[in-house]
Amino acid sequence: MEVGFLGLGIMGKAMSMNLLKNGFKVTVWNRTLSKCDEVVAHGASVGETPAEVVKKCNITIAILSDPAAALSVVFDKDGVLDQICSGKGYIDIHFLEAPVSGSKQPAETGQLVILAAGDKALYEEAVPAFDVLGKKSFFLGPVGNGAKMKLVVNMIMGSVMNAFSEGLTLAKRSGLNPHSLLDVLDLGGIANPMFRGKGPEMVKDNYSPAFPLKHQQKDMRLALALGDQNAVSMPVAAAANEAFKKARSMGLGDLDFLAVYETVKLLKHSS
Amino acid sequence: MEVGFLGLGIMGKAMSMNLLKNGFKVTVWNRTLSKCDEVVAHGASVGETPAEVVKKCNITIAILSDPAAALSVVFDKDGVLDQICSGKGYIDIHFLEAPVSGSKQPAETGQLVILAAGDKALYEEAVPAFDVLGKKSFFLGPVGNGAKMKLVVNMIMGSVMNAFSEGLTLAKRSGLNPHSLLDVLDLGGIANPMFRGKGPEMVKDNYSPAFPLKHQQKDMRLALALGDQNAVSMPVAAAANEAFKKARSMGLGDLDFLAVYETVKLLKHSS
Amino acid sequence: MEVGFLGLGIMGKAMSMNLLKNGFKVTVWNRTLSKCDEVVAHGASVGETPAEVVKKCNITIAILSDPAAALSVVFDKDGVLDQICSGKGYIDIHFLEAPVSGSKQPAETGQLVILAAGDKALYEEAVPAFDVLGKKSFFLGPVGNGAKMKLVVNMIMGSVMNAFSEGLTLAKRSGLNPHSLLDVLDLGGIANPMFRGKGPEMVKDNYSPAFPLKHQQKDMRLALALGDQNAVSMPVAAAANEAFKKARSMGLGDLDFLAVYETVKLLKHSS
Amino acid sequence: MEVGFLGLGIMGKAMSMNLLKNGFKVTVWNRTLSKCDEVVAHGASVGETPAEVVKKCNITIAILSDPAAALSVVFDKDGVLDQICSGKGYIDIHFLEAPVSGSKQPAETGQLVILAAGDKALYEEAVPAFDVLGKKSFFLGPVGNGAKMKLVVNMIMGSVMNAFSEGLTLAKRSGLNPHSLLDVLDLGGIANPMFRGKGPEMVKDNYSPAFPLKHQQKDMRLALALGDQNAVSMPVAAAANEAFKKARSMGLGDLDFLAVYETVKLLKHSS
């Protein structure tokens, strides 16, 4: 099976490398073509335009940064619509949406969780590729449900990260060893991979970006908007969202989302 | 080693039964003596007063519902002070404090996490009993640190439970299957035993008490007070605390703490 | 001067009646024409289409429920664009925006505060009408600033209403006379017309709609979105917004915005 | 009538000066006696001990910084109890409590609001002095109600100040003139003396202490604790309280309470 990739950001690059390693033929396109060099060095072909990628591949996966880019690759000149036809699969918001849960490292190792929704038949066709890209894929029903599920999960994660940041700060400021807190948490009912993996980094104030804070905040904002549409009041998520906004206002938007920890720590009055 | 127990509430009963099963001699006392019947049927002796228990045992463990009760068993007539002397170990707030993390089931199966602080030598002496009662014990430094650690952990847990409740509600109200959310969460970075164990109960609106909500709220209140003393601002914990208070105002204080989920769900206007 | 009105909702009707009483000639249009009957009975003319109103009047004021309606009256067939030309004033989002602060009663009595922004010359021309409609008009700069100012004011008002609701509830539940609280507040630093006017209604649980709660919540949501764009973290407004959402989820969206008071009061657990 | 004053902090000094100006005889005592110099220069006598003041005066008013000081002045050697007897009035928590609403300036000008509770007959006796000290006094019922009323009022005020700070910041960061916001607010439903008086100071970042932020935060904490006792959930007050705590953690506790505004403004990341 030949798989196309439109968009080679952090995630697209890791996912296409992963398919190459597993013996898939991969053709890639990116607005800035030089970003394709690394995957080409590992055996990928390059398409000059989205249309060319679609023409060449059975299934094309678009993983683009925002809805405007997603629309543009479809509808612009030499876009997907020029070549899409019966027998061609196109996986994105308007056909089969498949947002992923997991960041750079899971993308590289094929440990993503894939939240597909939309065209069931296309989902079935894409399953062999999904089986390489992720440890598990879900088919969640009508288009939109994949994005909603991702928002719900990321909203919970954002609130949990805030709860963790507050707890770490409270432990330190009241004289406890933060490493003891990590040990105790890891033996209890809310032990989880994120506390285990991110906790020691936070104690060292290390916020190298895996999932940028500004994207986490965007997901919380959208989850709250989804709640607004459905009249769901979510005071904890709202408080967490404001903390992420505070982090953005402190210039931390491009660091990893755990930098929200900085908003809880002691702050100097600067004016 | 002979071990005494003062207080046979849910936790004290489960812990003393556990020691009996593991071959320890156990003497118990409870203000309402009839509460001792079940453990006596399994081989425990009864002390008529706290003093009598201390006289008989090498180590006495007090597990009482509140500080007033803890003070009363020590200082009242026939209390601990009447018999405490060199060579007698007494484990509680003023000597060796050892709050536990975990509720009824972990108490029964010896899977508690024990957060000891205070007299290091007494801690060392008590380790054989702690090894039966818990899967792990920590010595955390000066008296007070055990209670603080427990507050920090429970505060994080309370916020996480609120985040979970909001996410479950948002999923349901925006048309997602809540069981899919549980499956997706269990594959991701914040997968944890609490979501796995409590999630299906919440979907069924089952709140049989393991850790009563009013006690969870009390711990959040005390954790926030600890933050206040140390000038730590914790907006997410504060929002979660208000949700637990709302649950109390709805008459849910005696249900399990996951009943905070009820505050997020659709409410009827009653007036 | 002949003034046109597009849109005869609660506000449009009150404002046009007010101009009629002050001797202006008024021509009105509304999508459902029967809504014009009352003002026609007081001397207004009716235009069959937005275009007809613009043709007839020097200045046309659009006061429509949402941006979609605002765009539709301008760009649809027989819309404003058909007749707008040099010498014709059109007051709305794209030309001169003039949101008002104040609800039904101030509209009827000419006590609105008018927050104009956009075309300065058109503002100057409209001042005689504004002087009748409002007790004060402001020119706030480029288009958009009128709407922004209104959002900021309503956001503050929404948070203040929540603070008031919480205080009233706390007073009652801790044994104070709520009327004493109203008296004390009215002598202090935060004495204000809203507490004075709405407080006695709230004590009686009277929420007859002047400014519907769902509109207040919409303004808070938009103000928070404006904060998001500008990286302003506003935890108090966020908490207040969630309370308004909770009120919506309780079915109170069509009552006056002070019904948020119901979310603070004792609630029965209904499930 | 001879009036005694125990405690010459900011408030005690202003109140005793005010009584002197109105022709009352005043005897004062303060732990650090040098603080009495200024009022003595205006005609006050000094008592060496609380007991001496009580002996000399018909009514003694204690205005002390905290409950510990209030207890000490009564129960310590040479304290109030040594001299209190039938015919002597003592106004404080345990007899007639009379917390005041208002800060330094209203104290100087006799514009305080006095919230008395406790012994009704003693209240009646004290009315002539209250009439000088305040523009209005309330008798609120049993002891405790005065303090509760003050907490409720200050809690509302603290939330309102946060709402105001957020609105001011949002206005500035989204391109509006903050002075226009002050003008618009002052014409609307929530126009109030605090916005009018403090707003221009906040725009200038002037936080000279009238009511220190740490005291405001203490009152919010106590109001939330009162809510906790009565199962009143107050999410907006809780969010405001965390903002005041954040201000304390930034080292702003001794500035005026409006310095909470600093927590909303753009912050630099300092680590």
Image: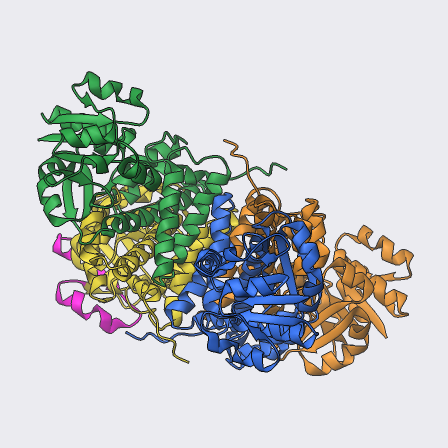
Chain colours: A green, B yellow, C blue, D orange
Residue numbers of the magenta segment: B20-44
Inspect the magenta stretch and tell me whether residue C131 lies in it: no
Foreground of the two, B251 or C267: C267
> C188 or B216, which is in the foreground?
C188
Quarter-of-image position of residue A45: top left
| Percent coordinates x, y for residue D245 in the rendering | 54, 50
Which residue is drawn at the image coordinates 72% and 67% (left, top)? D80
Residue at x-position 24% and y-position 59%? B175
Judge left or right: residue B207 versus residue D240. left
**Residue A106 percent coordinates (x, y):** 22, 34
Q: Is residue D91 left or right of residue C7?
A: right
Residue D112 in sight? yes
The image shows residue D196 at horizontal and vertical percentages of 71, 58
Q: Is residue B255 left or right of residue A169?
A: left
The percent position of residue D183, horizontal first and vertical second, equals 69, 57
At x 55%, y 70%, the residue is C28
The residue lying toward the viewer, choosing from B267 and A99, is A99
Q: Which quarter of the picture shows residue A5?
A: top left
Residue C103, above or below B167: below
Report whether A246 appears left or right of A26: right
User: Considering only vertical position in the picture, is B189 above or below D85?
Assistant: above
Quadrant of the image containing the C terminus of chain A = top right
Asked whether residue A189 appears in the rendered view, the answer is no
> Is residue B25 magenta-colored?
yes
- The image quadrant that residue D151 belongs to is bottom right
Closest to the observer, B41 or B177: B177
Q: Quadrant of the N terminus of chain A?
A: top left
